[in-house]
Amino acid sequence: MGYVAVKGGTRAIGESIKRLKYERLKRGMVLDCSRIESGLRCLMDQVMSESSLYNETLAALAIKQAEGSPEEAVFLLRAYRSTLPRKHYSRILDTGEMGVERRISASFKNIPGGQILGASYDYTHRLIDFDLGRETDADAVQWLRKFALEAEGENDRIDLACLPKALDYLRGEGLIAPCTHKDEEPDDVTKESVQFPTSRSQRLQMLTRGQTGAVTSLGYAALRSYGDVHPTVGELRIGNLPVYLDNPFQEANGEEDAYYIGEIKVTEVETLFPAGVPKEKGRKELAFGIGYGLCFGQNETKAIAMSILDHCLESANPAYPTHQEEFVLMHIDAVESAGFISHLKLPHYVTFQSKLDSVRKSKKEKKGKNRGNSEE
């Protein structure tokens, strides 16, 4: 079910839209889209993830038009995305080919290739930096020059492309099940309505494009007490994935027939869930389940929460709402949830008047009965 704004009263609506533009321009300054791209990286990544559209230029434009409102920007991008023809499909992306920028594991201290902290707010002091209020473009250029000189002096550079997966270490020891290859065509939630029960491809799509706050909240709920889970992050990696397209004019025949069309930044998480596996004579053996999360850009909290919910939905437990796919998947969509809440602002005159008449009638009847009882 989808909800959009219903308009009525042409003149009033025109004035409302004019006032909206005034609010955006009233300080006499225009926000440049290039500055949004350079300075609002996290918001850009969130909007692209929830929109299922990886385009930084369009994301910046949508954020500008929406005056920084993520839900409105996602609405704009989703609407635009629905108008685009789907001409080609890329080759399957292998996250093992990622050019890593950040890579950590909470399960292993030493992993092949090492822990790579990269860019993260995890290690900063959560104190407002008032110096940023006086920062200029010249300051930025000067800092970048200094940073580049320091980088040139580092000789112990590590090749960050194609780093091995941390969980492959456990798979090699037979401690977790190997990944099974499934060659069937994945379902596409943007082309067909979702029917329950869903396939895993549908669940992962809906989770990765789910509203960041909603996915995080339900993942947190599963950790607290509304889901029997408490995972450990096996590996979290952020980096750029190359995207290849098969030659559209001839039969695909190996890598040489593929065109490199660019790269996308993604966050990928694999989490480990300890679980008891029943054995003979009522005994249980400790094993590990896997939760998976992947979304556009650097979006770590959402990706971890996604992996938690992925595991919850794979091991459905009716005792917990976070294990019920219809409860989770139908309440995390940014456009659906915001639209349904926002529709309450629209006219409900007829239905409300009907309820009001019922209340008045009941009050009148009750008043009449009380008067009759008092006369007796």
Image (cartoon, helix red, strand yellow):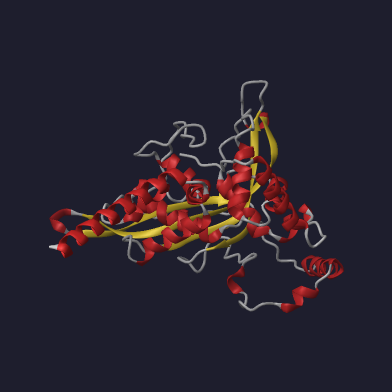
* Direction from residue 204 to residue 161 in the image, left or right: right
Q: Position of residue 257 (x, y in %)?
A: 67, 28
Residues 2 and 98: in front is: 2
* Direction from residue 165 to residue 17 in the image, left or right: right
Q: Position of residue 136 (x, y in %)?
A: 83, 69
Q: Residue at x 56, y 49 (%)?
A: 50
Please say if 297 is above or below 146: above
Looking at the image, the residue that sits furthest to the top is 250
Task: Quadrant for the C terminus, please.
Answer: bottom left
Looking at the image, the residue that sits furthest to the right is 138
* Direction from residue 24 to residue 295 in the image, left or right: left
Please say if 140 is above or below 185: below
Residues 312 and 84: in front is: 84
Q: Is residue 220 visible?
A: yes
Q: Position of residue 245 (x, y in %)?
A: 65, 33
Q: Residue at x 49, y 35 (%)?
A: 188
Q: Position of residue 66 (x, y in %)?
A: 66, 52
